[in-house]
Amino acid sequence: MEAANGCCHSRFLYDTHFCSHIHRTSVFGKGNAYFNLNKKQKQQLLTSHRLSTNTETSLEPARCAVRFRPCIDIHKGKVKQIVGSTLHDLNGESSTLITNFESEKSPAEFANLYKRDGLLGGHVIMLGADAASISAAVEALHAYPGGLQVGGGVNPDNACKYLDSGASHVIVTSYVFNDGKMDIERLEDLVRVVGKAKLVLDLSCRKKDGKYIIVTDRWQKFSDIALDEKTLDTLSMYADEYLVHGVDVEGKRSYHDSSP
């Protein structure tokens, strides 16, 4: 499901038009790893990326492709790589939060790097809706207009602000999965505001009673929705893509959750 290597993440993304895409970043170490790749490594990565996003192949129904999508996780205005399962509400957070790495580079610097190398569809994730994180996210969107998606506290009241700031899509979880249940009325309201083509649903999940259950509110609350084929089919009419973290392995640099 999810492996994280520094500020570059391997994430499972489901294209609601065609098929799933697994984003592999095993070439990366930690921290500013992408900055530290040599020219040959970058060329190999970008060649793979461009081949997988070639129009002639990527538009074939039911055809899978491997793509790399970068991620900029922002916590209190800084780019960080955090063990996802240690994220909690603000009370007592500092004593429990496990941070693998904090970059000295700003989110906008990462955005400029991804723009230079032609990496589309990266995720800017605000791990908390504090003013510093919002400002840093907007700066990254301004640096790479149309090249990044943004998530973290997105709702109909602020979604257009992020799109106007340069986001290609907004990523949403907690607003739609409200109080542990999927709220179709809220989802429909969101689609009316931003349009299906601009919406990514974050279906991040944790394992419970042998099933992967969608979690919300910084991955602390279990919903009553299992991540399965029926759920993916139902939601495909509302969203352009899905983003799925395997929360139990998020940030642990252990590649993906391969348990049955």
Image: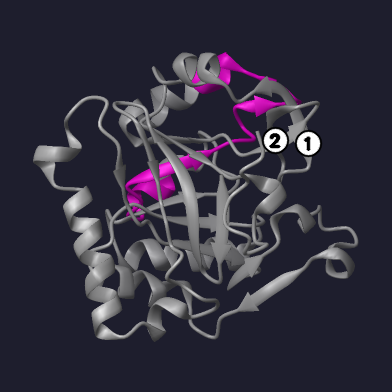
- 162 within the magenta span: yes
Q: Does residue 47 appear to the left or right of 245 in the view shown?
A: left
- Where disc 2 sits, the SS reads strand
Above/below status of 104 relative to 131: below
Residue 215 lies in what quarter of the image?
A: top right
Where is the N terminus found, in terms of image quarters?
top right
How would you rate the neighbour count of disc 2 (Cα within 10 Å): few for under 14, some for 14-19, many for 20 or more?
Answer: many
Q: Are marks 2 and 1 in contact (CB under 8 Å)?
A: yes
Q: Which residues are magenta?
A: 161-188
x 25%, y 57%: residue: 49
How would you rate the neighbour count of disc 1 (Cα within 10 Å): few for under 14, some for 14-19, many for 20 or more?
Answer: some
| Amino acid of disc 2 | Val
Q: What x and y, as percent, mark residue 71? A: 46, 61
Above/below status of 187 relative to 40: above
- Residue 78 visible from this viewpoint: no
- Residue 224 visible from this viewpoint: yes
Above/below status of 101 relative to 160: below
Residue picked out by circle 1: 221
Residue picked out by circle 2: 215
Q: Is 41 or 139 nearer to us in this picture?
A: 41
x 31%, y 74%: residue: 112
- Where disc 1 sits, the SS reads strand
| Amino acid of disc 1 | Lys
Mark-to-mark CA distance, 2 and 1: 5 Å
Q: What x and y, as percent, mark residue 88? A: 80, 54
Q: What x and y, as percent, mark residue 58? A: 19, 38
